[in-house]
Image (spheres, helix red, strand yellow):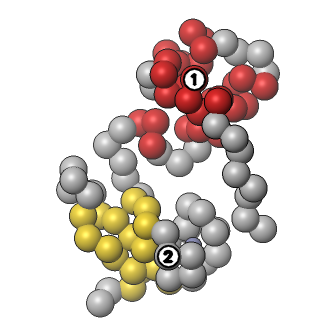
Amino acid sequence: MVTVIVFRRYCRKPEAVRRKGLSTHGHQRYRCENCKRTFQLDYTRRACQPGIKEQVIDMALNGSGIWDTAPLLRINMNTVMSTLKKKPKPSAP
Ligand SMILES: [Zn+2]
């Protein structure tokens, strides 16, 4: 088993993660040994990439509408709507 060091998306601790197969589009998936969540470093869909949802929320808080946000970030308007409707999760320390 190969162990790689990456910056994890969810618990953000610099510990080792393990490779965990491939996605349906052939991207490498990884599993965090601490929280047992799986993630990828490369995504096919732009809306799944880390940081896009935070950008949507920041733009909404700064007064940008859905019609401004979606084309600027190159994601679908339904993605912007669903991101804004979701309850925010508490961030990891
Ligand atoms: Zn984790």
Residue at (56% x, 29% y) in the render: 82
Mark number for residue 36? 2
User: Any atom of ligand 1 within 8 Å of the CB at mark 2?
Assistant: yes
- Percent x, y of residue 66: 60, 14
- Looking at numbered disc 2 in the image, what kind of residue is underneath it? Lys
Residue at (63% x, 69% y) in the render: 11
In the picture shown, does residue 18 fall above or below 46? below
Mark number for residue 81? 1
- Percent x, y of residue 62: 79, 21
In the picture shown, does residue 21 fall above or below 89? below
SS at mark 1 in the image: helix
User: Is residue 80 visible in the rendered structure shown here?
Assistant: yes
* Distance (Cα) linking label 1 and label 2: 29 Å
| Closest to the observer, 38 or 86 | 86
- Looking at numbered disc 1 in the image, what kind of residue is underneath it? Met
In the picture shown, does residue 44 fall above or below 28? above
Residue at (70% x, 15% y) in the render: 64
- Percent x, y of residue 31: 43, 74
Quarter holding residue 84: top right
For marks 1 and 2, the one nearer the N-term is 2
Quarter holding residue 54: top right
- Percent x, y of residue 50: 53, 48
